Amino acid sequence: MSDATAFVPNTHTGPVWERARALVTQPARDDAPWEVVREEMAVRELIHRYAYAWDQSDIDGLLRLFTDDGVIHEAEGTTAGPAALRARYERQVAATAHRFHLFTNVIVRVADDLRSATASSYFHVLLQKVGQAPRALGGLIVDDAVKQDGAWKFRTRSLTIDISYAPASGG
Amino acid sequence: MSEDHSEGFLPNAHAGPAWERARELLVQPYRDDASLAAVREEMAVRDLLHRYHYSWDQRDLDGILGHFTDDCVITDQGGVTTAGIAAIRARYERQMETTDHRFHLLSNIIVRLAADLRSGEVTWYHYAVLQKAGALPLGHGGLVADRVVKRDGEWKISARSTGVDLIHPIAATPAGD
């Protein structure tokens, strides 16, 4: 028997998972016109572009993906507005030398007016803090995205962590 | 299946019914003249697979079963079949009893739909962190090949072949450190 676990005690629970549950029970539209398909693909690209910017420590690039009133909700608290978001990312970049993000299980539902959308996605990241061994984190993010001046942006990102482990080293 | 999880790739990695179906699928060329209707249906099939994993990782048995047709057949790597929704329910119940937690990552999805947009074949990789009761967490990866059908406006899985290609140990760390 082992007490070791990769899953956090409250795995798959909490407000982020509740929002995801509400989202994934909404059926995909089987009569979606081309405009809806196009906007859904653009929202998916926004989610994936976040990984590229973050993994390259491109803080300006990250901030461009948020609206001016963009907010991140996480267990540590809420970070609101460009200045606070910049400070958050600067702290994390200083502390973490490398990151490698995977986003999957992306579910997107675009509003009828094609100006807002809600998305849910799993993330899994291998990261290496300065002076430490690599570790992995995984969890869920639910986004409220809006289209401003022709570009989709995050208005809120709500994230929760479900797994935390150290990848086994090779022998 | 071996109980020695130090090996990584299994002796039968990349073999079995799921990989055979995937190989057949992958030689079918991608349509570069796909209509809006075809793109829309392909996205709906991808949505089905992703929603399935939300249900599975949350241990939502009824949610899981809602993704399958009543006459679905699941074939595992050794050729053992589970036929019909009652048997599939029992299969998932057994898996839930022995595995406390799952975290699935889904990738490399290939979808090919029939010309009438009422059925299709899909293949995809899965990688999961699993934790059985009282055991160390494991990384678990493999391939699934699905046959899907659209019934009453909804895509569902009507046949599934599953394969496991690698299992490896994970060194757990305290959360939040």
Image (cartoon, coloured by chain):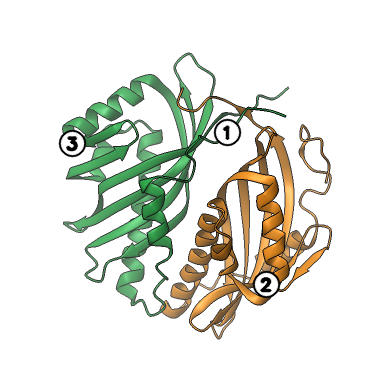
Chain colours: A green, B orange
Q: Nearer the viewer, residue B164 or A93?
A: B164
Asked which quadrant contains residue B19, the reply is: bottom right
| Amino acid at dot 3 | Pro
Asked which quadrant contains residue A81, the reply is: top left
Whichever of labels 3 and 1 marks the residue nearer the N terminus, that label is 1
Q: Residue at x 53, y 58 (%)?
A: B55
B118 on left or right of A18: right
Quarter of the figure that contains the C terminus of chain A: top right
Disc marking residue A6? 1
B27 on left or right of B49: right
Same chain for labels 2 and 1? Say yes or no.
no
Q: Chain letter of disc 1?
A: A
Between marks 3 and 1 in the image, the one whose residue lies nearer the viewer:
1
Q: Chain letter of disc 2?
A: B
For disc 3, the marked residue is A82
Q: Residue at x 68, y 49 (%)?
A: B97
